[in-house]
Amino acid sequence: MKLSLTTLPGLPAAVAAPRYARADLRPGIVHIGCGNFHRAHMAVYLDDLFNLGRGHDWAIIGAGVRPEDSAMRDRLAAQDWLTTVIELGQPELNQGPRVTGAMVDFLPVTPGHAALIERMSQPDIRIVSLTVTEGGYFTDPRTGTFSPDHPDIRADAAQPGSPRTVFGAILAALRNRRAAGLAPFTVMSCDNLPHNGHVTRDAVAGLAALIEPTLAEWVREAVAFPNSMVDRITPATGPAEIAMAAALGIDDAAPVTCEPFRQWVVEDDFPQGRPALEEVGVTFTPDVALFEAMKIRMLNGGHAIIAYPAGLRGIEFAHEAMADPQIAAFLQAVEQREIMPTLPAIPGQPPQDYLRLLSARFANAQVRDTIRRLCLDGSNRQPKFIVPTLRDRLAAGQPADGLILLSALWCRYCHGQAEDGTEIAPNDPNWPALTARAHEARERPEAWLEMADVYGGLGQDPTLRAAFATALRKIWDQGSQAAIAGYLAG
């Protein structure tokens, strides 16, 4: 059955359909970046709320700013913006497959983003949310602050009416609203990076400062950028996932598979109102940073801990890595010895309980999350998920041998060849530079730490340099298993 509004009444009995009429929804949100994570996370929460008969004026209009977003638009347009969401494994949490209908449109993706700017400028849009990946915020990894030097940012500053970037489009719409006497919409990042609201504000205001200093002041004073923490493991969609939907009796060109677990913690700063998402499990709190630190350091850091040794050993899936006793032990040891002691306390959520939860999630065999996905884009992920914890440990004079070993394993992975000699295909936007650096580091280990965009000034730390050189040489001389065994015995 081809998925569409027309065929919704005939969905198979095992697949839940929206319990609301799409004709009753009115848009209130433009979401930029409608990939799998958004459609398994924010769109599912809104679908839950709409199923309660609440918030029907908060439907989503999809949008994109990259050429590849057009392909997603085409796939979703052919099925009236509906998505099949299939939860995998963990039967105690699994709610079964469903079709969600929270998206009611998807704007054309065109150079200059005229349609996007026009729609965001209209008064019914009260929230603009975005999922543009951790590396899409034009930050300087050495400082974590906005960098105005990217050619696309410079182009947006020179031609603000026809922007290239998501932030240029947001700023153009905000300027339109200000000129029309309309209140600004709230800008909500749903990307997985620390203090994402602050980072988004800095990007929009930083671009505004290149155009007009008073505009930047207005952005900082008048526009809300709530911080949020998002979490749900959501693999990429390929033929296997499309086949899963087909096995349910649904012809869906863009289904989403995901783990049953999901979490969303949001700072409650929405001057133009917001949907009542607390009714469907979203946590609104002024202390997002507490939850964020635990999630980013333990879960995202934990993914790196299992991914790079698994990648070097030719292991394909995360659950297979968790079935390797040494890799599972490495995860437990680094988390407990080095990561958990850096975390602030969260009432009612002990780190040890969270570690048990994420270990079970990583071991979910039905999700089939790939090691290659977890190793992807280390040059953007390491500075956000690993280096801050490493910096804290070294600054406190505390051991960080596991995190340092992880950095060495990442370096060895970027050499481009697994330990059995199999080639590792490029897996980072900066892969050629990383590979060249990893080859240099085999003879001169400190070359790896001299990547200022990853390690900043920490790369000059003598303790780090000495320990990293020892770890990398042991990996090359004896293999990753021996290097990890030495750490676990320590």
Image (cartoon, rainbow, N blue to C red):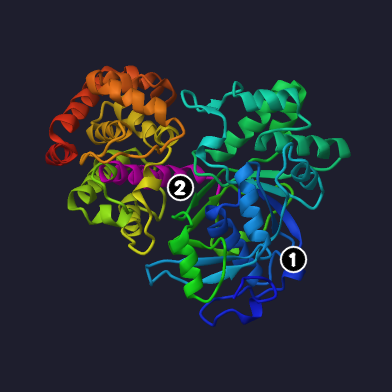
In percent of width and height, residue 95 lies at: 47, 72
Determine the CA span between mark 1 and mark 2: 32 Å
Q: Counting residues from the N terminus, which is met first, the one under dot 1 or under dot 2?
A: 1
- Residue 377 can be seen in this image: yes
Placement of 301 over or under 433, stated as above or below = below
Quarter of the image holding residue 368? bottom left
Q: Amino acid at mark 1?
A: Leu
Which residue corresponds to mark 1?
25
Q: Which residue is found at the position 60% from the left and 45% from the top?
A: 68
Q: Crowdedness of circle 2 by 10 Å Cα count: few (<14), some, many (20+)?
A: many
In percent of width and height, residue 41 lies at: 54, 57
Pick the quarter of the image with the N terminus. bottom right
Range of magenta residues: 285-310
Label 1, secondary structure: give it.
Answer: loop
Q: Amino acid at mark 2?
A: Phe
In percent of width and height, residue 136 lies at: 56, 36
Q: Which residue is found at the position 37% from the left and 39% from the top?
A: 425
Q: Main secondary structure of the magenta part?
A: helix
Residue 1: in magenta span? no
In-image side of 395 versus 152 (left or right): left
